[in-house]
């Protein structure tokens, strides 16, 4: 079995790559790239690199080898494909509309949705530590959003008062 340390390293690298994608999408959106172009490139390169990495680092264990999914597994595989594609479409579109920092923060709310779906769909109740983590991530997200809204409203008030002063002159 692979050591758990490899899983943590993989998760950190994956998170770093996802953050880079958000920044690159934001930059591509500013130069005029269409959301469907970004989704198409994600699909083509994602599948290509997944196949390459799968063949290079594929497991030699019999129950983990690459194979065609069975009829019982197919709904889950198709569900992953559809929800993943839809999720990336929405993330690409959102990253073009809002600053990368805000898109990254909103993206971190996925832990809340994963926790909720795990309870609803799988009827599993994760450990209390997971609930604590979900609450901490969501509360930090709410605090940052509130601070951002307050900052934006203060800036708008200042701009409005500058406009009134200019009009009075």
Image (cartoon, rainbow, N blue to C red):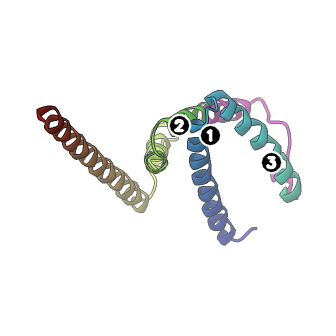
Residue range corresponding to the magenta coloring: 60-85
Kindly report which numbered mark, 1 or 3, lies closer to the viewer in this rendering: 1
x%, y% of residue 20? 61, 53
Is the Cβ of the residue at disc 1 closer than 8 Å to that at disc 2? yes
Determine crowd level at label 1: few under 14, some 14-19, many 20+ residues with C-alpha closer than 10 A.
Answer: some
Look at the image and say whether residue 59 sits in the magenta stretch. Answer: no
Quadrant location of the C terminus?
Answer: top left
Check disc 3 and report its element: helix, strand or loop: helix
User: Would you name the residue on which mark 2 appears?
Assistant: 96
User: Would you name the residue on which mark 3 appears?
Assistant: 49
Looking at the image, is 152 positioned above or below residue 77? below
Determine crowd level at label 3: few under 14, some 14-19, many 20+ residues with C-alpha closer than 10 A.
Answer: few
Look at the image and say whether residue 72 sits in the magenta stretch. Answer: yes
Kindly identify the residue that appears in the image at 84 percent across and 59 percent down.
Answer: 57
Check disc 2 and report its element: helix, strand or loop: helix
Kindly identify the residue that appears in the image at 41 percent across and 62 percent down.
Answer: 129
Q: Which residue is most to the left?
A: 168
Tell me, for residue 129, which label it has, or none. Answer: none
């Amino acid at each position: 079995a692979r050591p758990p340390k490899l899983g943590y390293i993989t998760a950190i690298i994956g998170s770093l790559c996802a953050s880079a994608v958000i920044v690159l999408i934001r930059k591509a959106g500013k130069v005029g790239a269409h959301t469907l172009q970004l989704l198409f490139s994600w699909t083509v390169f994602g599948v290509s690199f997944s196949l390459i990495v799968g063949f290079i680092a594929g497991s030699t264990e019999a129950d983990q080898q690459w194979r065609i999914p069975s009829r019982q597994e197919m709904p889950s595989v198709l569900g992953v494909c559809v929800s993943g594609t839809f999720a990336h479409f929405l993330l690409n579109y959102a990253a073009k509309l809002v600053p990368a920092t805000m898109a990254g923060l909103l993206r971190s709310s996925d832990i809340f949705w994963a926790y909720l779906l795990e309870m609803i769909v799988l009827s599993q109740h994760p450990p209390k530590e997971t609930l604590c983590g979900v609450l901490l991530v969501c509360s930090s997200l709410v605090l940052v959003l509130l601070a951002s809204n307050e900052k934006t409203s203060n800036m708008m008030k200042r701009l409005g008062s500058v406009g009134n002063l200019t009009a009075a002159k």
